[in-house]
Amino acid sequence: MAMVSLNCASLSSTSAFASGRKFGSSAYQSRAARISKCGYVKVTAAAQKERSYKVTLLPGDGIGPEIMNVAVDVMRTVGDREGIKFEFTEKLVGGAAIDETGVPLPDDTLEACRASDAVLLAAIGGYKWDSNPPHLKPETGLLGLRAGLEVFANLRPAAVLPQLADASTLKREVAEGVDIMVVRELIGGIYFGEPRGFGVNEGGHRYAYNTMVYSVPEIDRIARVAFETARKRQGRLCSVDKANVLQVSQLWRERVTAIGKDEYPDVELSHMYVDNAAMQLVRNPKQFDTIVTGNLFGDILSDISAQLSGSIGMLPSSSMSESGPGLFEPIHGSAPDIAGQDKANPLAQVLSAAMLLKYGLGETKAAGLIEAAVATALDKGYRTGDLMSSGKTLVGCKKMGDILLETLETSSRVTV
Ligand SMILES: NC(=O)c1ccc[n+]([C@@H]2O[C@H](COP(=O)([O-])OP(=O)(O)OC[C@H]3O[C@@H](n4cnc5c(N)ncnc54)[C@H](O)[C@@H]3O)[C@@H](O)[C@H]2O)c1
Ligand SMILES: CC(C)[C@H](C(=O)O)[C@@H](O)C(=O)O
Ligand SMILES: [Mg+2]
């Protein structure tokens, strides 16, 4: 399949969103220029020409279908306005797939994802499947999907929107202005390392083990994505590891240092142990610009970073491979405690759709319109329960979606 595959990460517009800057039409460039500025865009040449894209939707479990409905409505509305066509195909993954087909990642789901221009996932998992054997867990489906799409580079932007500075559990002066990009290696490390499993030792005691392993090519490719990303942001990269204890981290540090010295001398590189990084993220998050780390540490640090922004319900992510479609998903889970109650915050899902448009398809203007609609809804004081504070208007998931659609439709009447 002919792909447009560009290697420069232009991720600074997340900062524009974080700082509440407006997305004026003067900022928009011609389509060709937009695509060349927008790293990681990988769509077929035909899709790009026609502005007609195949998007596989994976609503998954728990709050997944609720937040996916909102994101799809928003994409349709923006698509109508901008002349972009979406061919949506919905597929099963996670617990929903187990119930329907007996496996968490049916072959036809992976095939559809591979054949699309981009994949939008909501979330998987739930109590019902928690005690299933490993191969029948929803999480195994998600990991299989990431591995099957070879999306090794997971970008998780954690920005404190000005409107939400008071929603953070940190003091305003600590939270305000935070704008961090966590670059997480997604298809290696302890999540996938072999050997792994359960056993019984000579003393008759059960034990379990996993292997944290990274090869040089795996470290080098994620390091390059992180350096490129940092270069487009404030030019500072902090590599997080546990090199005081783990050999895998010693190799990680050695390779990141070498790549920085040889290829990115303009990017300021620092190293931090993961325990200290967790503490520093809460103590003084503004010291960070871009963070690069392995799969497990990235999972943990991105949830900490999410809470800086006020709620995990706000944080989107994009996961990119070297040449296939990108996978876009919020960083939160299926929130089984609030599923089916119309309480979920759909904004991380909607912002994941914006990342899909921007980084997956090169549709920067449409992405900007979605980001602007989210900012407007928050400016008007609408909040789902996770972000609610006094003086704001409490809304449910569906209502938040309606407000976004109204905002998009109103702004279209004003600007057309
Ligand atoms: N990418 C994914 O699909 C993904 C990510 C994380 C966890 N999970 C799975 O989700 C299930 C639940 O995991 P968990 O409880 O540890 O994490 P979770 O992210 O689902 O929920 C943690 C807390 O945050 C709240 N929350 C999460 N998203 C929210 C949203 N959009 N709006 C409002 N509140 C929100 C939840 O109500 C809960 O109190 C597990 O099965 C887990 O494996 C899936
Ligand atoms: C559900 C789980 C497998 C997943 C992960 O650990 O990567 C989740 O926590 C995430 O952050 O996307
Ligand atoms: Mg996680």
Image (cartoon, rainbow, N blue to C red):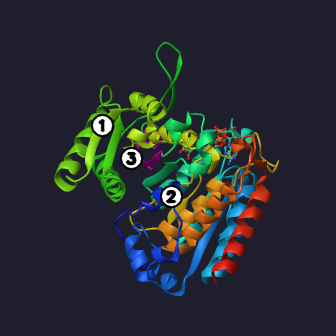
- Residue on which disc 2 sits: 318
Quarter of the image with the N terminus in it: bottom left
Separation of residues labelled 2 and 1 (CA atoms): 24 Å
Separation of residues labelled 3 and 1 (CA atoms): 13 Å
| Residues rendered magenta in the picture | 178-193
Residue 219 badge: none
- Residue on which disc 3 sits: 289
In the picture as drawn, the residue positioned furthest to the right comes out as 341
Q: Quadrant of residue 388?
A: top right
Q: Quadrant of residue 389?
A: top right
Question: Mark 3 or mark 1: which comes first in sequence?
Answer: 1
Question: Which is more foreground, mark 2 or mark 1?
Answer: 1
Q: Amino acid at mark 1?
A: His
Asked if marks 2 and 1 touch (Cβ < 8 Å), the reply is: no
Disc 2 residue crowd, few under 14, some 14–19, many 20+, Cα 10 Å: many
Q: Amino acid at mark 2?
A: Ser
Q: Nearer the viewer, residue 341 or 81?
A: 81
Residue 35 percent across, percent down from the top left: 42, 76
Disc 3 residue crowd, few under 14, some 14–19, many 20+, Cα 10 Å: some
Residue 212 percent across, percent down from the top left: 39, 36
- Asked whether residue 190 is drawn in magenta, I would say yes
Can residue 116 be seen here? yes
Q: Nearer the viewer, residue 200 or 357?
A: 357
Q: Is residue 318 left or right of residue 220?
A: right
Could you tell me which residue is drawn at 44 percent across and 82 percent down?
Answer: 30
**Ligand 3 appears in which quadrant?**
top right
- Residue on which disc 1 sits: 271
